[in-house]
Image (cartoon, grey):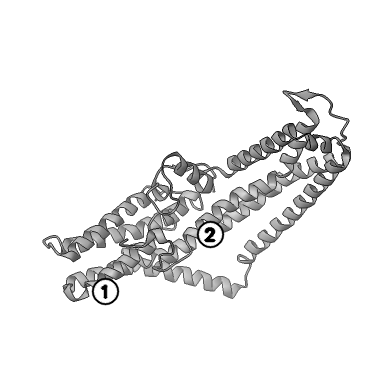
């Protein structure tokens, strides 16, 4: 899975979308921080902020400088940081165990999971009239393409009509086509890369299912048999998107948590080494002089502390994206959980 920035200005994260709202520069910055940005780059920016803030306090606050000149605050601070790093590594091991526990089950459980997966693919194949793709992006695109066909068929049934139902169908199809176009752009996303997850999330599934069911219920008495049949087939195709999205999201989260574990373990070694070196060897009198108005001792302590908190900053950057995606995909069904997504308002 790649961490590179993926077309931050399009699709799921457009400013008009409810996923991550905002307009102009602030909207792009917010989307970059929450979703689009490379997690390493975000962690480095956070580290830069920590360094600049602590250094500014050290330069402007005389009491802070006096405290740093004594060994005890330095030893206490870095001892606490070293303890926190070790605790964080323990947390990482726990996360790995939780992820692996889902992969290491008895044979009967593994067979049941495989049977469920194959059964779902067979059900999808009955709808898309072909073999369901194995790649997540292409799988979602295939289902959405089937929805395209059925939406077009529904439009054809009201082509010569000038009724309220025809207007409602036109609005529904327009919204569907917008999401469908964005999904099709990500159909070739590689397995478990962030773009593959986007292909599953770009389509506003909950809203679309709700609207399709509302059309069938509110206009049931005025529907022809053909319109009712086409609308039912459209809903049948829509219902596969929810389980597929949740499955792809689960796989992505497992991969992301494993990557997070590897990243934190990688950063923890130098961070722990710096913390222990500061505890054992850093003395207030070892770093005399000033640079650009800042005492070298303050700069050294601030830099060492920033390196020591880097594993925590990486944890923040990765978890920020995970919880943002989780917040926006809490439901598998047709529930609309955010007020700004209420249909028809």
Judged by depth in the image, the label closer to the viewer, 1 or 2, is 1
Which quarter of the figure has residue 99? bottom right
Foreground of the two, 263 or 45: 45
Taking the image as drawn, is residue 153 in sight?
Answer: no
122 sits to left or right of 59: left
Q: Are marks 1 and 2 in contact (CB under 8 Å)?
A: no
Position of residue 344 relative to residue 72, above or below, is below
Query: Which mark is drawn over residue 217?
Result: 1
| Percent position of residue 238, x then y | 34, 65
* Of the image marks 1 and 2, the number of the one nearer the N terminus: 1
Which residue does the numbered mark 2 point to in the structure image? Answer: 251
Which quarter of the figure has residue 212? bottom left
Position of residue 40 relative to residue 119, above or below, is above
Extreme residue toward the left, this view: 160
111 sits to left or right of 9: right
Query: Which mark is drawn over residue 5?
Result: none
Badge 2: residue crowd in 10 Å (few <14, some 14–19, many ≥20): few
Foreground of the two, 54 or 279: 54
Q: CA distance from mark 1 to mark 2?
A: 35 Å
- Quadrant where the C terminus lies? bottom left
| Percent position of residue 2, x then y | 54, 45
Q: Residue at x 45, y 68 (%)?
A: 118
168 sits to left or right of 10: left
| Percent position of residue 199, x then y | 42, 53
Taking the image as drawn, is residue 295 in sight?
Answer: yes
Q: Secondary structure at mark 1?
A: helix
| Percent position of residue 112, x then y | 53, 74
Position of residue 308 relative to residue 242, above or below, is above
Q: Secondary structure at mark 2?
A: helix
């Amino acid at each position: 899975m790649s961490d590179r920035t993926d077309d931050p200005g399009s699709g799921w994260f457009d400013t008009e979308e409810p996923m991550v709202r905002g307009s102009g520069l602030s909207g792009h910055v917010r989307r970059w921080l929450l979703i689009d940005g490379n997690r390493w780059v975000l962690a480095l920016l956070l580290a830069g902020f920590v360094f600049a803030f602590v250094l500014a306090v050290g330069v402007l606050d005389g009491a802070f400088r006096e405290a740093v000149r004594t060994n005890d605050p330095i030893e206490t601070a870095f001892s606490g940081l070293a303890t926190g790093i070790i605790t964080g590594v323990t947390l990482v091991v726990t996360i790995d165990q939780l992820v692996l526990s889902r992969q290491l089950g008895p044979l009967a459980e593994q067979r049941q999971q495989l049977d469920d997966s194959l059964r779902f693919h067979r059900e999808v194949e009955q709808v898309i009239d072909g073999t369901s793709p194995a790649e997540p992006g292409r799988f979602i695109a295939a289902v959405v393409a089937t929805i395209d066909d059925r939406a077009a068929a529904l439009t054809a049934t009201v082509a010569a009509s000038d009724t309220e139902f025809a207007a409602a169908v036109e609005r529904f199809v327009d919204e569907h086509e917008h999401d469908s176009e964005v999904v099709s752009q990500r159909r070739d996303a590689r397995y478990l890369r962030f773009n593959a997850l986007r292909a599953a999330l770009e389509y506003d599934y909950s809203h679309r299912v709700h609207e399709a069911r509302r059309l069938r219920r509110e206009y049931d008495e005025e529907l022809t048999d053909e319109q009712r049949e086409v609308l039912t087939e459209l809903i049948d195709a829509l219902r596969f998107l929810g389980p597929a999205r949740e499955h792809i999201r689960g796989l992505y989260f497992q991969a992301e948590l494993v990557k997070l574990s590897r990243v934190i373990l990688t950063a923890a070694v130098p961070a722990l080494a710096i913390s222990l070196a500061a505890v054992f060897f850093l003395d207030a009198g070892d770093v005399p002089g000033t640079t650009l108005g800042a005492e070298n001792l303050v700069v050294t302590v601030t830099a060492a502390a920033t390196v020591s908190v880097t594993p925590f900053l990486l944890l923040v950057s990765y978890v920020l994206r995970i919880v943002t995606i989780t917040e926006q995909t809490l439901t598998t069904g047709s529930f609309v959980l955010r007020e700004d997504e209420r249909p028809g308002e």
